């Protein structure tokens, strides 16, 4: 397979980021199977969600011409989230390589571009991929500002965008000002992850939470999503601490953690999560259990350095190595054969699953990725078991999938997962109405979560 890496310079304007991260050789055709429909909402095919006919930025070539299917993959290959991007990239490559880079009789060419996690850079790279490289599909994206910027662009350019990196902005697929029929999300969003987390924490017997999260868009959205569900269940927030994104010293914050809390709710993606966990044991805060949101701090790429410091942490996200399904076992077998000794992670499983989804959709259109409307319709209809679990889209073209709660445990000289609970077929509207999803001020409640009451949550949901 031909892969082109673009390392073109972009404007260096500082923009706040938001993410938000050995066995036998792999078989020639990785496992893909259709799953029976569940009670979760299915993708809409109503005329209102049908994309308009393409009028600009049409890719060169056609299925009839037999040229390669060009897929642009936007990843933050440098910067705070580079370890996340590397795992995601390697997972996607692993799956496509196992297909001999061929789907529906056509070669697949992945063209990578480095967004640096910045909205302006990501937007420029997306334009280059579509208008110069003539890709038919865009994939990837980890930082929320990049997701929002590129989603606006594809809405006008009429190019399918598959969010397969992270890109968890809550309003991406529900805010009328942002949503687009050209954008599908296959990763996660704040309420999908955090509503089960709040539910599980309360059921586990925890009643008082100290929130410690990175001070940027995703950290603020995620904290509000978790707090609102936890408080609705009967819990309370006793503290909020928000270290800056990219902080090197978490000591001043760890020293302040309220010891009356039952646990710490934490969100620190990328290298920030590694630093937080490395410093955690040096302060009194280490006496409290941790709920690792998105499994971001104890992700696979951090485990070789954390080692025993990760043991005992409870994490929740959309993949776990402890999930015993044929699709996950096929992924782990292929990963271990290619990367012996390297931990698989949610992000590598996300990339691998993205390859499964891309293949399923391309097969539905006989490889004709240049037919944007046909390809989008195929994406809307994907209902599949992947390395992550059962996946499909809701009526907003956002992901419906499983959420896993697990404990980090010692397994010989390595760290593994002990599965504690599985929330099946969760969507962003698992516990929330469409009206609440549109109006709840997820990113604007910094400093207002301590003492938040159930009645206040309900009022915010109606605002």
Image (cartoon, helix red, strand yellow):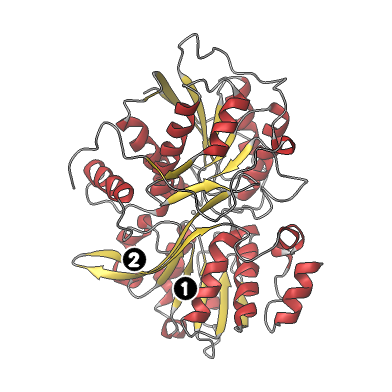
Residue toward you, 460 or 7? 460
Question: In x, y percent, where is residue 245?
Answer: 58, 60
- Residue 306: image tag: 2
Quick one: which residue is furthest to the top in this view? 65
User: Residue 120, position in %: x, y?
Assistant: 67, 39
Give the residue pinned by disc 1. Answer: 291
Quadrant position of residue 56: top right
Marking on residue 271: none
In-image side of 315 versus 183 (left or right): left
Label 2 crowd (10 A; few <14 / some 14-19 / many >=20)? some
Q: Position of residue 233 (x, y in %)?
A: 60, 80
In the image shown, does 280 or 423 lie closer to the viewer? 423
360 relative to 372, above or below:
below
In the rendered structure, the answer to whether residue 326 lies left or right of residue 158 reads left
Question: Label 2 to label 1, Cα distance in Å?
Answer: 16 Å
Label 1: state its secondary structure.
strand
Query: Percent position (x, y) of residue 333?
Result: 24, 46
Q: Residue shown at 61%/70% (left/top)?
A: 242
From this view, report whether residue 139 is shown above or below residue 201.
above
Front-most of 266 and 462?
Answer: 462
Q: Residue 435 is drawn in which quadrant? A: bottom right
Regarding residue 48, the answer to whether it shows in the image is yes
For the N terminus, give its image quadrant: top left
Residue drawn at the location 18% of the way across and 48% of the way down: 22
């Amino acid at each position: 397979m031909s892969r082109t890496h673009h390392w073109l310079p972009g404007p260096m304007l500082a923009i706040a980021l938001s993410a938000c991260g050995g066995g036998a050789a792999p078989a020639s055709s990785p496992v893909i199977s259709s799953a029976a429909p569940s009670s979760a909402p299915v993708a809409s095919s109503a005329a209102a969600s049908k994309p308009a006919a393409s009028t600009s930025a049409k890719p060169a070539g056609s299925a009839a011409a037999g040229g390669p299917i060009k897929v642009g993959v936007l990843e933050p290959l440098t910067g705070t989230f580079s370890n996340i991007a590397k795992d995601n990239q390697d997972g996607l490559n692993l799956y496509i390589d196992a297909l001999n880079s061929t789907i529906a009789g056509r070669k697949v060419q992945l063209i990578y571009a480095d967004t640096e996690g910045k909205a302006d850079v990501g937007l420029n790279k997306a334009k280059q991929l579509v208008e110069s490289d003539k890709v038919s599909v865009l994939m990837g994206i980890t930082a929320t500002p990049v997701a929002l910027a590129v989603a606006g662009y594809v809405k006008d350019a009429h190019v399918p965008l598959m969010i397969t990196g992270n890109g968890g902005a809550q309003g991406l697929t529900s805010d009328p000002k942002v949503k687009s029929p050209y954008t599908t999300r296959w990763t996660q969003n704040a309420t999908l992850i955090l509503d089960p987390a709040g539910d599980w924490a309360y059921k586990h017997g925890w009643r008082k939470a100290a929130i410690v999260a990175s001070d940027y868009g995703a950290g603020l959205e995620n904290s509000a999503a978790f707090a609102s569900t936890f408080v609705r269940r009967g819990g309370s927030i006793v503290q909020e601490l928000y270290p800056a994104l990219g902080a090197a010293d978490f000591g001043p914050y760890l020293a302040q953690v309220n010891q009356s809390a039952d646990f710490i709710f934490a969100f620190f993606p990328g290298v920030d999560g590694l630093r937080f966990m490395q410093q955690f044991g040096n302060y009194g805060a280490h006496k409290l259990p941790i709920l690792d949101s998105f499994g971001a701090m104890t992700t696979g790429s951090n485990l070789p350095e954390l080692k025993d410091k990760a043991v005992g942490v409870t994490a929740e996200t959309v993949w776990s190595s402890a999930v015993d399904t044929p699709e996950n076992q096929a992924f782990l077998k292929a990963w271990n054969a290619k990367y012996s000794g390297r931990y698989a992670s949610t992000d590598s499983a996300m990339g691998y699953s993205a390859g499964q989804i891309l293949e399923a959709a391309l097969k539905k259109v006989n490889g004709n990725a240049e037919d944007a409307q046909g390809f989008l319709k195929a994406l809307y209809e994907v209902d599949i078991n992947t390395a992550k679990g059962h996946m499909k889209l809701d009526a907003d073209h956002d992901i419906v999938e499983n959420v896993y709660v697990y404990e980090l445990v010692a397994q010989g000289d390595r760290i593994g997962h002990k599965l504690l609970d599985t929330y099946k077929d969760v969507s962003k509207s698992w516990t929330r109405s469409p009206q609440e999803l549109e109006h709840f001020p997820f990113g604007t409640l910094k400093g207002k979560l301590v003492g938040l009451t159930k009645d206040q949550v309900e009022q915010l949901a109606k605002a």
